Image (cartoon, grey):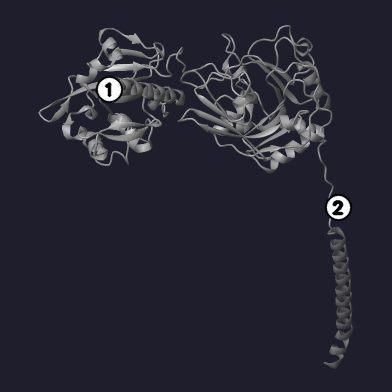
Amino acid sequence: MRLKCMKSVPFFVLFVIVKMIMVYFTFRLFISFGAYTKTENFEPVTRIVTKPPTKHISKLVTVIIRDFELYENDVTLTAHSFLNIFPTMQLFILYDELPYPPLDIMLTNYTMPNVKFINLSPMLKTPFTEHYPLFQIKTKYVLFVPDSTRLTSRQILQVMVSELSKRPGSVVVAPVNSRKKDFNCLKINVKVREWTLKYSAVKSLECDGVSGRHVILLETDTLRNLSNAFLLPFPQSLYIQTAALYIKGWQIIRKNYPHHQGIIVPRRQARVTFPPRAVEAEARGVAQAETPLRPVEDQAGGAGRPGAVEWYGCTKDTPRCFTTVIDSMPSYLFEKKWTPPCCLSNLRRTARHVFNTLDESGVRYWLEAGSLLGAMWSGDVLPWDHDVDVGFIREDLSRCEWLRKAADRPAVDQQGFLWEKATEGNFFRVHYSKTNKIHANLFPFYARNGTVTKDSWYTSHKNMEFPENFLHPMSSVDFVGRSVPSPNNIRDFLELKFGKGSIENPEYPDPNKLKFP
């Protein structure tokens, strides 16, 4: 038994030695693997590979030349100045009438597929998608460039793109060799419902628009939100549209684009069309617009007259701004607009003329219906009203020369106002002129058994009879800048005709058709 154990000892020793060797090499292998792993896990050196700036900007920006003279311009050299710096950049030349003589770049454009010429006017054989640039612009940004601009390096455009990328949805501009006094930041207040447009200069680098020659960079998506992004005159129409949408943040870059001297700045008669009706106009010294934005109040010094208010259309020689009124509901109410301000202005003039004439004639009269409601509401014509209502004592008709004449046939007085008897009832109208039919209605009332009534009525409840004691004694109220006779207890009088709370809660003439906003 002892001998047997002695024989097994060498094998045991050998087994231990083999195990130790295996552990040793395993440990060595582990160390080697760890070293290898540590070596391989060194932080790699980052290599930033950037696209060439020229190529990068070319894929981001489309250049558009929009407004230029058809007969004498610098469009070809303007376009080439950009293509020399950015050869592959997309460039559009837009026009409403084919330039003649043809632009040199149009005649030699066989090797520049990135340059496009787009006629914005509808053409019989051309689909809409081919003559409206927004369907063809593929870049994120659009750069509007005035004629006779020069690009001499890519730096200024890169700065503009960088600024716009920091504030998406805004607009970035840069002057084109503009003197400081010619380059101003403008605040533009557009009120579509009131048909008004107001300019004022502001000392800021953020504004609604800019005066003076300049380049404009904005996002293509911004253009897609506008009603007509390429409307002439440009860029004035662009500013009006962006201001109406409350697009803010016009960032002014204080770097100048060079300008080639000696080229005519566009002064063509241009049109801005905003339905429903167009009126020839000139705004801010620029051949402006067919637009329903009737007055332009210019506090920015346009046309050399700071603070001037210009009214477009609506003279004694032009028709009024709206057509025949049906059921006392003018068409503009259904367009979610109120009475055009020039019509309101002429309505005030007509009302004051009527009041003065009746005063001089000794006719007893008072403010009626919606006009009296306007006097109580704001001391003025209701901003959505289209006429002025006046009641007078029928027995006093003979005292007024022009009412007597109008009873027989229409008559125009010395100041050009037309007096006539209404064809649809026994009452009178005084029009602003024979052409412009903004008017005041004169209703002849008489007393009968303690009630004031008249012989002809509209269907409206506002023309109802009323107790005679409302006129004894008469009162007065401020209206269109002067004191005007009125019934006494005006609130009771109006609530009798229009209902409780009518002064605080006005309504359109027919609330069943259209609710007051």
Cα–Cα gap, marks 1 and 2: 100 Å
Which residue is at 71% across, 31% downward? 183
- 70 to 146, vertically: above or below: above
Q: Depth check: 195 or 85 in front?
A: 195
> Residue 444 placed where, x, y %?
22, 21
Determine crowd level at label 1: few under 14, some 14-19, many 20+ residues with C-alpha closer than 10 A: few
Query: From where the camera sits, is residue 225 visible?
Result: no
Q: What residue do we see at 60% from left, 25% from top?
A: 237
Q: Which residue is mark 2?
A: 45
Residue at x 25%, y 17% (from the top left corner): 399
Mark 2 surroundings: few (<14), some (14-19) or many (≥20) residues within 10 A: few
- Reading the image, the residue beneath label 1 is 362
Q: Nearer the viewer, residue 393 or 188?
A: 393
Q: Quadrant of the N terminus?
A: bottom right
- Image side of residue 296 versus residue 401, left or right: right
Q: Which mark is residue 40?
A: none
Q: Quadrant of residue 91?
A: top right
